[in-house]
Image: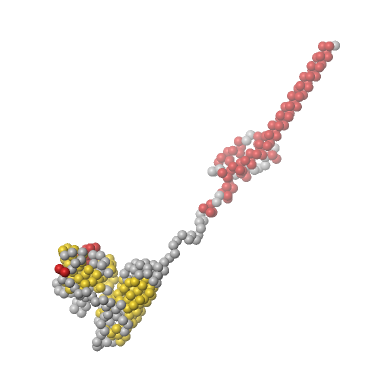
Amino acid sequence: MGRGTESKDAVIFTLKGLLLVAVVVCLLASLASWAVGLAAQAVPALAEVLTPASPGPTPTGTDAPSSPPATAEPTANAPAEVPTSSPTETPAVAPTATATAPEPTPTSEPDACTDHVEFLADVTVADGAVFGPHERFVKTWRVRNAGSCDWTGYRVVFSGGESMGSPEGPILDTPAGEVVDVSLEMTAPEGPGEYTGKWQVRSPDGVDLGTLICVINVKDGGVDPVVEPTPIPPPAPPAEVNEERWIDVNLSEQVLTAYEGRTPVRTTLVSTGLPGTPTPVGQFRIWIKFRYDDMAGADYYIEDVPYVMYFHGGYGLHGVTWHGNFGHPMSHGCVNLPTGEAEWLFNWADVGTLVNVHD
């Protein structure tokens, strides 16, 4: 009796132990299943968070199938969200539009300057001055650059009325607010009567700033003298000139000599004005230089005259290409030089260089 009872109790104890083990195993299996389901839901959500920071679509495509529990769980716990994490949505989020559309109206450019001219006075040839037919004169206006643009390359251009043989001429470079004298060499018309000419101060881009007017009377009798602002200094003998660099023009010999102090450094034959259009005599200074300039008179118009240096109104030193008769008067008053000599002189002399013209 004792052994049978003990044997039965042992069997019952063993069965209870096995049942306990089975319960524990079931609980562990259920816990594992719950953990797998939770992981299957967390993986797609994590993929959606991380995908925008990914440089490209390839990593998220290979990461999706790397979670084995997803194939062991019902599809209800793993909705089709992995495909929605596809990088095809990324371009719609990328701010490419702002990268290619900068502000259309920047305000960094400075305000444009303004152009304006103010007439001050007639320096020479007052309105109504009397001249004989074909008489030459120099008309000079005094004006102010009344705008905020500095004048560089500005010109005075004929715009109406009687041109008096002077279609246009240069204006000396003038800073804003400064005063400048504008001169044109003119020729009185042939017939008697009153003549009015108009010229525009014009910028390099073709904008007209204001009108300058010249009014003269032509008579067969006496004429009014040209009014000069100051008398022209008389010429001086070369030995009496005291300048660092200067130019001597001998009308009698038709010779030009460039001096440094009292030492001649270059001499050339020239052609000065004809008897009817003489070269002015006196001491002058170069007031403007042009590599090329157009020249006009009553009976001529020449484009691109080389190496021009004006020393008195429209009178200048310049090269010529239309004759080679140097050593004889040939011009309308300017000093003609061989082109090679004019180039040398142009590079040697500066604005302000003395020009001493004498017989």
Nearer to me, 101 or 235: 235
Q: Where residue 64 appears, x then y in whole percent? A: 61, 39
Q: Which quadrant of the structure image shows residue 339?
A: bottom left
Q: Where residue 256 appears, x then y in whole percent? A: 17, 68
Horizontal side of residue 125 vs 324, given as left or right:
right
> Going 20% across and 77% down the picture, which residue do you hit?
278
In the image, residue 216 sits, relative to residue 21, either above or below, namely below
In the image, residue 58 sits, relative to residue 315, either above or below, namely above
> Going 43% across and 65% down the picture, which residue do you hit?
112
> Going 18% across and 64% down the picture, which residue do you hit?
261
Whether residue 158 is visible here, answered yes or no, is: no
Q: Quadrant of the N terminus?
A: top right
Nearer to me, 104 or 110: 110
Q: Which quadrant of the structure image shows residue 12?
A: top right
> Going 30% across and 74% down the picture, which residue do you hit?
183
Nearer to me, 145 or 24: 145
In the image, residue 175 sits, relative to residue 141, either above or below, namely above
Horizontal side of residue 102 vs 1, given as left or right:
left
Q: How was the colour assigned to the protein in this rendering?
A: secondary structure
Q: Where residue 298 appears, x then y in whole percent? A: 27, 78
Q: Where residue 156 appears, x then y in whole percent? A: 33, 73
